[in-house]
Structures are given as structure tokens and as C-alpha cells.
Image (tube, grey):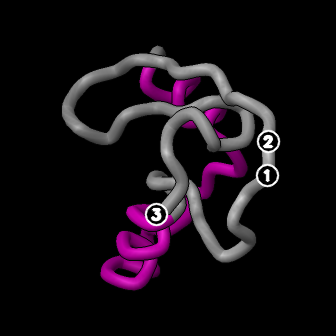
Amino acid sequence: MMSRLEQPGGGTSTERMVYFSPEIKGPRIEEARNEWEIYIDLAKRIKPEESYLIDFKDANEIRTEIAR
């Protein structure tokens, strides 16, 4: 899993808080994933019929949804 500072576009916490950490450019571990991608993959496996509700392409889309 990537740290919040490694996530493309910056990180958004999934720990019952909303905050933004800007991305710090640098080398990445190829197989590492964003924290939010792991939870979305899990949720889609649990309830695939409702996966369209959480079909986010990046962290900014998640922040926009949280703001809404």
C-alpha cells in the first residue's frame, strides 16, 4: 500500500477523518496501490450489483463525493 504522500493526486484518509495530503513526487513501488483502491476493490467484490456507486477513478473524485 502506498503512503498518502505517494498517492497520485494526493491522499485522502479512510480513517473517519477527511484531510488532504499532497503527493510528493519520487520513485514508486509498482505493485503498491492507493489505500482507497484496496477498499473499493473489496466493496465491489462484496456487493458487485452496487459497484457503480463507488466507481471512482482517482482520489479527487472521492473528495468531490465527500464534499457533496
Position above or below: 9 against 56 = above
- Whether the residues at callouts 1 and 2 have beta carbons within 8 Å, the answer is yes
**Could you tell me residue 36's position as x and y percent?**
47, 52
Residue 61 lies in magenta, yes or no?
A: yes
Q: Identify the residue shown where x is 49% and y is 45%.
A: 3
Position of 68 compared to 47: left or right?
right
Magenta span dominant secondary structure: helix
How far apart are the two marked residues, 3 and 2, measured between alpha carbons?
A: 25 Å
Query: Which quadrant of the structure image shows residue 9?
Result: top right
- SS at mark 3? helix
Q: Which residues are magenta?
A: 38-66
Mark 1 surroundings within 10 Å by alpha-carbon count, few (fewer than 14), some (14 through 19), many (20 or more):
few
Contact between labelled residues 1 and 3, with CB atoms less than 8 Å apart = no
Q: Which mark is residue 40?
A: 3
At a point 57% along the width and 23% down the height, the residue shown is: 64
Give the residue pinned by disc 2: 26
Q: Secondary structure at mark 2?
A: loop
Viewer-proximal residue, 33 or 55?
A: 33
Q: Dot 2, how many residues are within 10 Å of its Cα: few (below 14), some (14-19), or many (20+)? A: few
Q: Which residue corresponds to the image point at 35% horizontal and 77% vertical from the top-left?
A: 47
Q: Is residue 12 left or right of residue 56?
A: left
Which residue is most to the front? 27
Closer mark to the observer between disc 3 and disc 1? 1
Residue at 63% across / 21% down in the picture?
Answer: 22
**Residue tagged 1:** 27
In the structure shown, which secondary structural element does the residue marked by tag 1 occupy? loop
* Amino acid type, callout 1: Pro
- The amino acid type found where label 3 is placed reads Ile
